């Protein structure tokens, strides 16, 4: 079904793997389009609770946008490329089901922007992060100038954006760019362990947390008001009744996501 991705449903986790290992999983336009479709597919499947995004192989999560593809672009094509890329990243960030990036090597340029659009990032020890676009006479075009500041703060973000330097996984952890660093052979397992925590929670509550957090970073929304509304609406859900009853009855909640 997908040309540049491998997808698989394992239990309640939907795996999306970028499958261009010979090109360091570089994100050509088709691959980005397919990632958006795969995230939509996962969100439409009621069995799915968590979405994993990773790269095939042990060298790269994604080494950026496909330089060979865009090298001949002009201004109009460049603008369209960025606008389309932003739409892909937004669709991941706004996914009601949590998207976990399992970062397995070079995570540069658009690859770093892709990882930053995910809700959680778990990295292998060999992962390298950076926004090297300035080396190409470019700037990040898939949200990197914004999300890097949001995640690690303006000062360090400017250092990375201006220098184009790549940082190692332990530095990314210290900056809060990733949530966890593990040996590469444990990467999938670490993702599954984290996902199993999320799988036991209320899917409605999980999606509302994502919505409220995103609202705080959207200039046309009031995140605090969003939280008041979403908190109130939670009282009308079956998951709320189940969660509170389970607590009072001293049993494990069985959330249906309704
Ligand atoms: N776009 C297109 N092709 C890419 C790519 C990208 N962003 N990154 C790597 N590739 C390709 C290489 O051209 C090469 O293809 P080839 O075998 O047909 O020549 C293949 O992937 C392997 O890459 P190579 O450079 O030989 O591997 P390496 O281990 O020596 O270096 C990197 C790995 C990631 C450091 C290096 O490939 C690199 O700097 N990539 C570009 C990073 C970048 O600037 N990203 C931002 C783009 S906006």
Image (tube, rainbow, N blue to C red):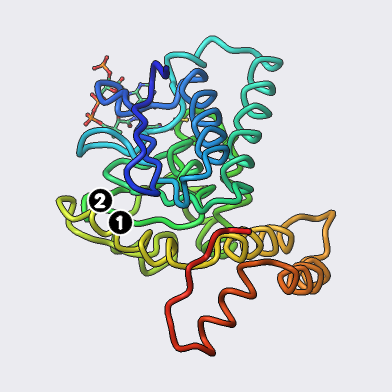
Position of 241 compared to 163: left or right? right
Q: Which mark is residue 50?
A: none
Snapshot quadrant of residue 33: top right
Element under disc 1: helix
Snapshot quadrant of residue 132: top left
Q: Quadrant of the C terminus?
A: bottom right
Looking at the image, residue 175 lies above or below residue 122: below
Q: Is mark 2 within 8 Å of ligand 1?
A: no
Q: Percent x, y for residue 198?
A: 44, 63
Instruction: Look at 65% across and 34% down and name the residue there.
Output: 87
Looking at the image, residue 83 lies above or below residue 223: above
Choose between 196 and 187: the one closer to the eye.
Answer: 196
Q: Quadrant of ligand 1?
A: top left
Element under disc 2: helix
Position of 124 compared to 241: left or right? left
Choose between 8 and 222: the one closer to the eye.
Answer: 8
Is disc 1 in contact with disc 2, using a CB cutoff of under 8 Å? Answer: yes
Q: Cα distance, mark 1 to mark 2? A: 6 Å
Instruction: Look at 40% across and 49% down and name the residue there.
Output: 12
Dot 2 alpha-carbon crowd within 10 angstroms: few under 14, some 14 to 19, many 20 or more? some
Residue marked by disc 1: 192
Residue marked by disc 2: 188
Q: Percent x, y for residue 219?
A: 80, 55
């Amino acid at each position: 079904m997908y040309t540049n991705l491998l997808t698989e449903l394992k239990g309640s986790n939907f795996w999306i793997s970028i499958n261009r290992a010979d090109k360091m999983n570089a994100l050509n336009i088709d691959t980005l389009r397919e990632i958006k479709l795969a995230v939509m597919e996962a969100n439409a499947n009621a069995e799915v609770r968590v979405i994993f995004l990773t790269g095939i192989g042990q060298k790269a999560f994604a080494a950026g946008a496909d330089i060979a593809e865009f090298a001949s672009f002009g201004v109009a094509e460049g603008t369209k490329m960025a606008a389309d890329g932003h739409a892909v990243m937004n669709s991941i960030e706004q996914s009601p089901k949590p998207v976990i990036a399992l970062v397995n090597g070079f995570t540069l340029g658009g690859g770093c922007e892709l990882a930053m659009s995910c809700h959680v990032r778990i990295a292998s020890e060999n992962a390298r992060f950076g926004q090297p676009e300035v080396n190409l006479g470019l700037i990040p075009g898939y949200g990197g100038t914004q999300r890097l500041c949001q995640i690690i703060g303006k000062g360090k973000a400017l250092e990375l954006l201006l220098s184009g330097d790549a940082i190692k996984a332990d530095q990314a952890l210290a900056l809060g760019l990733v949530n966890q660093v593990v040996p590469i052979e444990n990467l999938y397992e670490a993702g599954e362990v984290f996902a199993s925590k999320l799988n036991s929670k209320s899917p409605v509550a999980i999606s509302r947390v994502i919505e409220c957090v995103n609202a705080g970073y959207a200039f046309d929304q009031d995140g605090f008001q969003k939280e008041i509304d979403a908190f109130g609406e939670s009282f009308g859900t079956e998951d709320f009744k189940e969660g509170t009853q389970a607590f009072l009855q001293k049993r494990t909640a069985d959330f249906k996501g309704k």
